[in-house]
Amino acid sequence: MGNQSFLSIVFILVQLILTTHSLYFHIRETERKCFIEEIPDQTLVIGKYKVELFDANSNTYLPSTPGIGMHVEVKDPDEKIVLSKLYTSEGRFTFTSHIPGEHVICLYSNSTAWFGGQQLRVHLDIDIGEHAVDYQQISAKEKLTELQLRVRQLLDQVEQISKEQNYQRYREERFRATSESTNQRVLWWSIAQLLILVIAGFWQMRHLKGFFEAKKLV
Amino acid sequence: MLTPTLRVLFVLIAFLLTYIHSNELTFELPDNAKECFNEKIKVGSKFVLEFQVVTGGNYDVDLELKSPSGKILYQVTKKQYDQIEKTAEEDGVYEFCFSNEFSTFTHKVIYIDWRVDGDPEHEITGPNPRVAEGALTMIESKVGNIHRNLESCIDYQTHHRLREATGRARAEDLQERVQLWSIGQFVLIIIVAIGTVLLLRSFFTDRRTSSSASWSR
């Protein structure tokens, strides 16, 4: 028996299970849907999606519609576009982050409908870091034993944790900078307020004194 | 003894059996909007839904979880964080909706973690699913342990990150408010100072003109 072909059947099975289990949501044809992923730098993100178009005749969602494509746009924290591509109705997009922070992933169809159009059902699965690595594929490609594979997974996990921790340190720094800046501002404002009050009071007294003297009240 | 290929196969099957589908998404919920997500779940599967409002308004949101037959399994209003664990009692499409319909001007950022465990007929209970296969050495079980611990470590990190995000959003908000209030207070002090003087002046001017008017009468 060809072990290779047997393995590939198993892969297909795994893939089937992976694809059938997925969260989905509905959007209108012209609608744009965005998701935010806050990730450290040098992190792999893999997104898988499938679009189904609502068919009014049969009142169901058609499993595959050739005409429909999806635009995928990924923006990094500096609003720069990392990835902007048109895919078919079913696809996979990958990108690696270069700066840490909030990455915005937007999906919208290539539909040219003017008024809302039909309803689309979008299956989406986004995997980040270690979750994005396909261990089944690795084990088949590199012929690793179970233990080697598991250790490799551990290594990836630890790496992800340390990246995340690095990022957390960076964010904590920013957080503290904000807090300290607020603190500084409050302090300076208190001093400025004191000065303004004294000056205002002084001016009031002087002005009134001049006024009363001019009116010969005192 | 097992041939290497067969071993790999076992690994694959193990992966397949222990496969837990997890979906983490963070999305923006505009004001007055409702956002729904669905998934087809088989009867007997366990599913966990965790959500947290990261930023926006009072950090609260409405949630409704519906079973395929339309029964409301879980409903909560104005909640910041919650974790719901349920076992599917029927086959079909489960739906959960976040709604911000009570809020008219604040949009929110919401994080969800949605996990569905494998089908019950495939699931092997116990802390280590591979024990059933009997091909587990000490080192393998240790590695498995480490794997699970690291997994929870990543989970904690995620929560910490979200909490930090909430905290930072609030701090940035606070800074902005302090700045605005300072400007407001500055303007207010000047207006009050000038206003007081003008008022006092008008009192004395009025009294004098009215009194002089009475004298002249």
Image: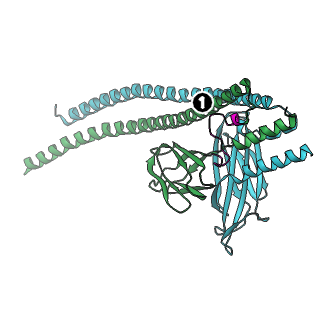
Chain colours: A cyan, B green
The location of residue A27, given as percent across then percent down, is 63, 60
Residue A118 or B159: which is nearer the viewer?
A: B159
Pick out the residue farthest to the right: A2
Quarter residue B158 falls in: top right
**Residues shaded magenta:** B117-132
Can you say which quadrant of the picture contains the N terminus of chain B? top right
Residue at image position (71%, 24%) is: B138
Horizontal side of B210 relative to A57 (left or right) equals: left
Chain letter of mark 1 equals A
Quarter residue A192 falls in: top left
Q: Main secondary structure of the magenta part?
A: loop
Packing grade of label 1 (10 A; few <14, some 14-19, many >=20) is some
Residue B32 or B131: which is nearer the viewer?
A: B131
Q: Name the residue under label 1.
A: A171
Does the magenta segment cover residue B98?
no
Residue B24 or B130: which is nearer the viewer?
A: B130
The location of residue A33, given as percent across then percent down, is 64, 54
Residue at image position (53%, 55%) is: B97
- The answer to whether one can see residue A135 in this image is no
Residue A23 in the image: above or below residue A67: above
| Residue type highlighted by circle 1 | Arg
The location of residue B124, given as percent across then percent down, is 65, 41
Pick out the residue farthest to the bottom: A57
Horizontal side of A81 relative to B105 (left or right) equals: right
Residue at image position (52%, 50%) is: B107
Horizontal side of B74 relative to A114 (left or right) equals: left
Q: What element carries label 1?
A: helix
Residue at image position (48%, 29%) is: A182
Residue A115 in the image: above or below residue B53: below
The location of residue A44, given as percent across then percent down, is 74, 38
